[in-house]
Image (cartoon, helix red, strand yellow):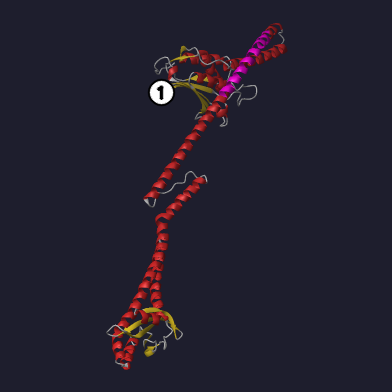
């Protein structure tokens, strides 16, 4: 815009300069024509005083630098100001006399640059009787143009300064700073800051761009969250698959080991029992009982390995909850020494279960065995039906409870906090798999009194009838 306006001013100044020059030339011509007739009459009457008076009147105006009258031979008749005395060699003077048409041009007169205009002096009959020369300083034309040019360029400069100020400050406040905010936000996003957002400000177009950028960033963030959730889900599935594969491998090994150990242990126990009947001395009895004790411990391990390797539930039978728990308590009492912790049974709901009785009884025995080994005085057994019709069997002991680092590890195979020789680390793992096969859940935590709490949760599908509270 500034370049276009500058070009327009340049063209305009050229036109104005030409118009100003034409006007100055016209002024000289008008002055010359105004005095040419009186001078013509005075020359015809040979009245040189009148000729001189007319020249002096023109010179006194101030716009004329010099004026003179010549005869047709180029000889000076009268003069005022700076003039030439002889025009016999002047091309312009000769052309004026020959053509009768005014001539003008820039010339040097007495070492000064002037604009000279030659007008023919004619009598009333139209005959050329002389020549009028009017000189004006050439600087008058330049000064007129320079003044106009200075005014025009000063005006353009002021316009340029105002325009640039408006563009710079107006653009910055109206557009620039908002564009900078957009750029900064994009740089932050490129640097990894996905939380960067742009406040929609400025012109409506920039607000739409900012809103579009924010929506895009929100979509990217949501997509990344969904992708991360999928990754976590896939990782958990992979972990679960590895656990299943691990359990399957352990189950296969456990089954093979159990079968290989079962027959030799039976033989060893039978031989030890026979020797007990034939060797009655105290030392033999003590040694053989120790052998049978170790055999029984290994037999228990074999039974747990077999239970661990069993296939999922395929056959369900109906049994009352109270009957199932009584059977498990009876089974565990044969393992208890005199003076050990006792089992205290609370109020039970009168419900009938449809489950794999042997496997669920094994799960209850394993939990009770752990609870009695950890308890100091008593193990409490309670049960309830929650709002979702799920059955919860709650077993609490008054022991020291589980350390925090064992709450998850205790459910893994061969993980135990019992002294060496006191546990295999398979008991709770077996319980977990039995409940999982019944679509149930095992929860291991500490109770309010500091002991350990185990919750066996069976879904409503494991109940054969409508739950109702009852006692034993």
Query: Which residue matches tag 1?
Result: 388
* Residue 54 at x, y percent in the picture: 31, 89
Q: Is residue 263 magenta?
A: yes
Seen from the viewer's position, the closer of residues 440 and 449 is: 440
Q: Quadrant of residue 56?
A: bottom left
Relative to 311, residue 222 above or below: below
In magenta, the rendered stretch is 243-270
Total number of numbered discs in the rendering: 1
Q: Main secondary structure of the magenta part?
A: helix
Q: Relative to residue 354, is residue 53 depicted above or below? A: below
Farthest residue to the left: give it: 124
Q: Quadrant of residue 104?
A: bottom left
Residue 38 x, y percent position in the rendering = 28, 87
Q: Is residue 359 above or below residue 89?
A: above
Q: In the structure shown, which secondary structural element does the residue marked by tag 1 occupy?
A: loop
- Which residue is at 43% across, 45% downward? 213
* Spot occupied by residue 99 in the image (x, y as percentages of width and height): 35, 79
């Amino acid at each position: 815009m500034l370049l276009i306006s500058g070009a327009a001013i340049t063209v305009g100044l050229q036109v104005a300069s030409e118009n100003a020059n034409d006007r100055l030339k016209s002024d000289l011509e008008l002055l010359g024509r105004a005095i040419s007739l009186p001078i013509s009459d005075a020359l015809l009457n040979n009245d040189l005083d009148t000729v001189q008076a007319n020249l002096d009147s023109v010179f006194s105006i101030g716009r004329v630098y010099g004026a003179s009258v010549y005869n047709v031979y180029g000889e000076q008749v009268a003069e005022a100001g700076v003039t030439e005395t002889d025009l016999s060699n002047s091309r312009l003077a000769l052309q004026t006399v020959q053509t009768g048409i005014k001539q003008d041009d820039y010339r040097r007169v007495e070492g000064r640059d002037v604009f000279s205009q030659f007008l023919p002096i004619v009598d009333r009959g139209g005959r050329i009787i002389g020549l009028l020369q009017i000189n004006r300083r050439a600087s008058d034309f330049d000064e007129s143009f320079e003044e106009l040019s200075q005014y025009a360029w000063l005006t353009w400069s002021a316009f340029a300064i105002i325009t640039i100020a408006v563009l710079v400050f107006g653009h910055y406040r109206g557009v620039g700073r908002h564009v900078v905010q957009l750029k900064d936000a994009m740089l932050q996003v490129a640097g990894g800051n996905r939380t960067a957002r742009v406040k929609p400000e400025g012109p409506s177009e920039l607000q739409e761009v900012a809103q579009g950028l924010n929506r895009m960033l929100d979509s990217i963030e949501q997509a990344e969250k969904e992708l991360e959730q999928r990754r976590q889900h896939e990782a958990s599935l992979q972990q679960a698959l590895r656990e299943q594969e691990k359990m399957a491998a352990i189950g296969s090994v456990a089954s093979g080991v159990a079968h290989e150990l079962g027959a030799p242990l039976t033989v060893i126990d039978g031989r030890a029992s026979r020797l007990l009947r034939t060797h009655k001395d105290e030392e033999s009895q003590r040694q053989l009982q120790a052998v049978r004790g170790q055999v029984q411990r290994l037999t228990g391990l074999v039974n747990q390995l077999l239970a661990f390797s069993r296939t999922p539930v395929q056959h369900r039978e109906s049994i009352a909850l109270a009957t199932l728990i009584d059977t498990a308590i009876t089974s565990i009492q044969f393992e208890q020494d005199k003076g050990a912790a006792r089992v205290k049974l609370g109020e039970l709901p009168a419900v009938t279960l449809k489950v794999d009785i042997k496997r669920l009884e094994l799960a209850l025995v394993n939990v009770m065995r752990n609870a009695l080994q950890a308890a100091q005085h008593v193990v409490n057994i309670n049960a309830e039906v929650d709002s979702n019709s799920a059955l919860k069997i709650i077993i609490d002991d008054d022991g020291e409870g589980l350390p925090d680092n064992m709450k998850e590890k205790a459910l893994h195979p061969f993980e135990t906090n019992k002294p060496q020789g006191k546990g295999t680390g398979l008991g709770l793992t077996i319980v977990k798999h039995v409940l999982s096969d019944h679509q149930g859940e095992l929860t291991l935590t500490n109770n309010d009194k500091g002991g350990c709490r185990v919750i066996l949760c069976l879904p409503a599908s494991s109940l054969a009838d409508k739950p109702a509270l009852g006692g034993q």
